[in-house]
Image (tube, rainbow, N blue to C red):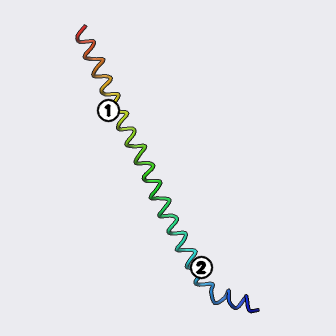
Amino acid sequence: MGLVRVLKDKAPVLVFSGLCAGAAYAVYYAHHQQIAEKKVMRQGVINDIKRDRIKRREMQQKEQQ
């Protein structure tokens, strides 16, 4: 009975701690997910810039011929 009484007394603290830990993990996960998405989006912009440069060079070479 001693253990049950201790758990009853500590239950609100344990539940609150669990909720706080879950919320903290959700924020952590969302933050790192956003960072990963930002890197992917930035890489897409860099690839677009490279494609534009290649197209410009090809157009200039065609004009010179």
Name the residue located 48 percent from the left edge and 62 percent from the top edge. Answer: 28
| Number of numbered callouts drawn | 2
Query: Which residue is depicted at the point 25% across and 7% down?
Result: 65
Q: Position of residue 54 (x, y in %)?
A: 32, 23
| Callout 1 amino acid | Ile
x then y, percent, for residue 61: 27, 13
Q: Along the horizontal axis of the image, is 8 left or right of 40?
A: right
Q: Position of residue 30 (x, y in %)?
A: 47, 59
Tag 2: amino acid: Val
Count neighbours of disc 2 (C-alpha within 10 A) and say few if under 14, some if 14 to 19, many if 20 or more: few
Whether residue 7 is situated above or below residue 44 in the rendered picture: below
Label 1 sits on a secondary structure element that is helix
The tag on residue 21 is none
Disc 1 from disc 2: Cα separation: 51 Å
Residue 63 x %, y %: 23, 12
At horizontal 41% and vertical 46% (from top left) the residue drawn is: 39
Farthest residue in the right direction? 1
Q: Dividing the picture into quarters, in which one does residue 41 lie?
A: top left
Furthest-top residue in this view: 65
Residue at numbered disc 1: 49
- Residue beneath disc 2: 15
- Residues 8 and 32: in front is 32
Secondary structure of the residue carrying numbered label 2: helix
